[in-house]
Amino acid sequence: MNMDSHLQEDLSTNNENLYTNELGIPPPRQENITELSRYFIDLRGAVNEKSYLFQRHELEQGLERITLRTREMNFEKDYLYSNLRTLEQIKLVERRLNHYKCLEESNNDQPPQWFINFFNDPNVGFLALKREMVSMDARQNQRLEALENRQNQRLEALETRQNQRLEALETRQNRRSDVIEESLRSINQKLSKQEYRYYRLHNIQLRSLGKSIDVVPFVNGQEPDFDLPQIHSIEDIENLTKDQCTRYLDGYGIQYGPNETIKLKERLRNAVGLESLGDSEFLLSGFR
């Protein structure tokens, strides 16, 4: 409802500026379809023509700018080509100049005539120089041989002194080793004897408790030979042969007489710690 009222109001309004334009298009003589269509077509055509003219003007100006830029680029191209040809010409001239300089320097490097004659005369200069070189070579070889001989003599003397020092050092080292070994043997003997005393005292304690004794190692720290009967009681000593008994006494370092019999067993009894009252009262017999 409101839209229809506004439309009727716009159509009924007589706007004098509605058909005024800057393109020279005459306004419609009457407000009817024919005149309005004619005015609309003429106005739109004039606007399109104006836009076309503006775009054409812009294109023409752009073409002029492109043409001007092309001329500038052609000028720069010609300038660069000209400089390139000039540089190539300069290089060629420089090469030619260097060539002549080299020729002149090579001519200046030629030795003087007297030097050339000296080497061209085989009977004077060159042979004399050759003989002198041979003589110098011989003297140099002699000096080198003498130097080598002196060097060898020095090396031999140095080697001799070094060997003497090494022998003396080895002798001292061997002496020290012998002393150390002797000390170690003495310490081992003392330790073995100490171990023997320990086992003997331990067996005395065992016998005081009525127990069998342990095997006592020899004074050298080794166990009794495997073929010897082990001694754990006084009866074991009673059953030994004379050879077995003396082997035990030797192992424990006990001295004895050659004609002893029962005394040997008594010595062995005391050596292994069989010192209880029962052991002392046990009547040992001679060897069978």
Image (spheres, rainbow, N blue to C red):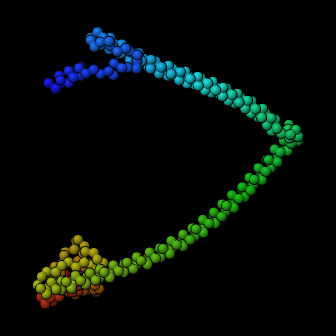
Q: In this view, does 226 lie above or below 235?
A: above
Tell me: 242 left or right of 114: left
Quarter occupied by residue 199: bottom left
Quarter occupied by residue 38: top left
Residue 248, percent from left and from top: 25, 79
Q: Is residue 228 above or below residue 50?
A: below
In-front residue for pair 134/213: 134
Measuring 53% from the left and 23% from the top, which residue is drawn there? Answer: 65
Residue 130, percent from left and from top: 81, 44
Residue 215, percent from left and from top: 20, 77
In-front residue for pair 82/21: 21
Measuring 19% from the left and 76% from the top, which residue is drawn there? Answer: 230
Quarter in which the N terminus is drawn: top left
Tell me, yes or no, if residue 77 can be seen here.
no
Measuring 78% from the left and 32% from the top, which residue is drawn there? Answer: 100
Residue 67, percent from left and from top: 55, 21
Measuring 47% from the left and 76% from the top, which residue is drawn there? Answer: 175
Quarter in which the C terminus is drawn: bottom left
Quarter occupied by residue 2: top left
Tell me, yes or no, if residue 226 can be seen here.
yes
In-front residue for pair 63/179: 63
Q: Which residue lies furthest to the top in this view?
A: 34
Tell me: 279 left or right of 113: left
Count of numbered badges drawn on the protein: 0
